[in-house]
Image (spheres, coloured by chain):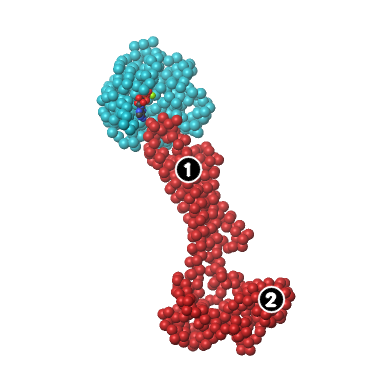
Amino acid sequence: MAARAVEPSWRTKGMIECKDIAKIYQSGEIETVAIKDITFTIKDGEFVAIIGPSGSGKSTLMHILGCLDIPTRGTYLLDSHDVSQLSDNELAEIRNRKIGFVFQSFNLLPRATVLRNVTLPLVYASASQHEREKAAVSALHASAFPEKFWHHYPNQLSGGMMQRVAIARALVNNPSLLLADEPTGNLDTKTGEIVLDTFQRLHMEQGHTIILITHELYVAEHAERIIQIRDGNIVSDSPVKNRRIANNHH
Amino acid sequence: MRLQDILQETYTALSANKARSSLTILGIVIGIGSVIAMISIGQGASGQIQSSIEGLGSNLLTVMPGFIQPGRGFVSAGRGSSQTLKNEDTDALKHITGIAAISPELQRRFQITSTIGNNTNSTVIGISPEYARVRNVEVAQGSFIAENHVTSMGRVAVLGPTVAEDLFGEENALGKTIRINKINFKVVGVLQTKGSAGFFNPDDTVFVPLSTMQKILAGSDFISTIAISVDSKNLMPQVQEEATLSLAQKHRVDPQSPDFSIVSQADILGTLTQVTNTFTIFLASIAGISLIVGGIGIMNMMLTIVTERTREIGLRKAVGAKKHDISTQFLTEAIMLTFAGGIIGVALGWLLALAVSRFAGLATQVSLQAVLLAFGVSAAIGIIFGYYPARRAAALHPIEALRYE
Ligand SMILES: Nc1ncnc2c1ncn2[C@@H]1O[C@H](COP(=O)(O)OP(=O)(O)O)[C@@H](O)[C@H]1O
Ligand SMILES: [Mg+2]
């Protein structure tokens, strides 16, 4: 069952380089060290799973990698740019151009149609109507979202469908990095499988860099590499030996 | 973010909870509506007073006992100043060039009864024939007070149309007898309708010869006013000054602080305009309070919206919304609410003003300035009361906002 995406020659430099990054939350007198000076590199086009028990710092790490937050110390290079000390607006700009998020709870706008939800990142990129439509159509195709629901509202869709809208939204700005925090956490096994299949296809067919955060080993084994963290430390970092391929039901 | 997107987001957000948006708008509608209505009532009153004062007689100077300083009222009311003008003062003014006519007047209020039993309490003015010319009044029926009435101390009266109607109803008053202070007078004329001039209503007045007034009715040799009609408008200051000097000399007083005052129509108009402006501002301020209450309603709703949509704000920030994108969106929502309220409020205020002039008989005037002011104020209220909630939304940290339950 092992499968590996063909690795093109241009995938040499690290697209994510973290050096001694730490995140410390300060609430009053109490300091919580969520991430403890960790160092790792993820190359362009890799599909990496970050696994660890609840409270181990996975989400904190994802927020930093996704430029939603900055590390307390250490350097984080994204595409060779140091983003660890940027301002809020500069971080917003980077999220808008380079990063696509998929959350456990979908986070779709309830009063917007599927199409409007998918184009939301392009609204903030001030893209033209034409560009938006083109990008939304190809993103919805890439996430295998059926065309007949494009004008539906989120509350008319199943959980699996909503997550595919969220994936399309994450893809619409053609990001260099796709970040998913427990994307199957709110889904049953069967729909979870469809979502994992979508990630695997995006990785293999389109060469997207994907970081998948989960606490389930079974889910993590759909990636090529697993970084295991515990109490804010990396405890292991190794390629997946028997990689799982998601069943595609569609 | 493009303007079209901001407007679309605003429309979607506000129409999502129509009842709440409408109630919030209603607060602004009431505020703006009452400001417009109050200003138009005030300005209407002002306009009406102005036109009726102009109708009282052109190029008019009025000599009154007591010293009035502009803006300070009667300064020397304490030194018996109400009786300093006499008939001879009229003679002292006659030689001044530029004066067209001089009308000495003595005014009192009396109970008046008619032969058919009606009675009314009205102003009675003792006058000379010049009154008609100086004060711009015309008889509708009969004749005005004539010179021989004055010299013979005739017991004749000319009625204002309101008095005539009060006393005789539909009947013709001409030739009838009325009793003023229990003394019989024969009605020789009825005036044309002129309309009220603020404090003075010439229609509700009875005119008798000055001599009759002084000797028989009031028992006083003094006069209450001398009205002077000046040949032309640009002679007014000069005539006013000469008259002051002549009268001061005659009264043997210092012209800087005489025991009489000469005011021009412009002075009266200025004072009344000041009064009505104050009145308008007062009314508008009271209405303005409801506008502030409406603004607080906007703020309250916006704060609720920001809390409700915390996760949405987090998501928007995660996909690249900057601080000003978020604050613009919420500020636009607030401004849209107040603007909608402003438009409906102007319409409502207008209708209210129309209703007031129709049913309460007050003149109203909806000016363009008032409308523009209303729009400016409603936009400002949107900005002021929407600013804090919008800033609060923009300042949310994306992670905290996404995690919000
Ligand atoms: N905003 C915060 N303030 C204080 N402590 C936090 C905050 N966010 C996370 N933590 C703490 O940091 C640690 C890691 O949390 P998190 O990254 O959410 O873990 P995971 O996603 O692996 O469950 C936990 O101990 C958590 O309590
Ligand atoms: Mg987590």
Q: Is residue B368 visible?
A: no
Which tint was used for chain A?
cyan
Residue nearest the observer in this picture, A159 or B157: B157
Q: Is residue B290 visible?
A: yes
| B286 vs B210: above or below | above
Picture coordinates of residue A184, whole percent (x, y):
43, 20
Residue shown at 65% from the left, 81% from the top: B157
Chain with colour red in the figure? B
Q: Find out if the beta carbon at label 2 lies less than 8 Å from the nearest ligand 1 atom.
A: no
| Residue A64 falls left or right of residue B373 | left
| Residue B357 falls left or right of residue A77 | right
Residue shown at 38% from the left, 17% from the top: A220
Residue marked by disc 2: B113
Picture coordinates of residue B322, whole percent (x, y):
37, 37
Picture coordinates of residue A133, whole percent (x, y):
45, 32
Chain to which the residue tagged by mark 2 belongs = B
Residue marked by disc 1: B300
Residue shown at 32% from the left, 29% from the top: A30
Q: Find out if the beta carbon at label 1 lies less than 8 Å from the nearest ligand 1 atom.
A: no
Residue shown at 65% from the left, 75% from the top: B111
What is the tally of numbered marks visible in this picture? 2
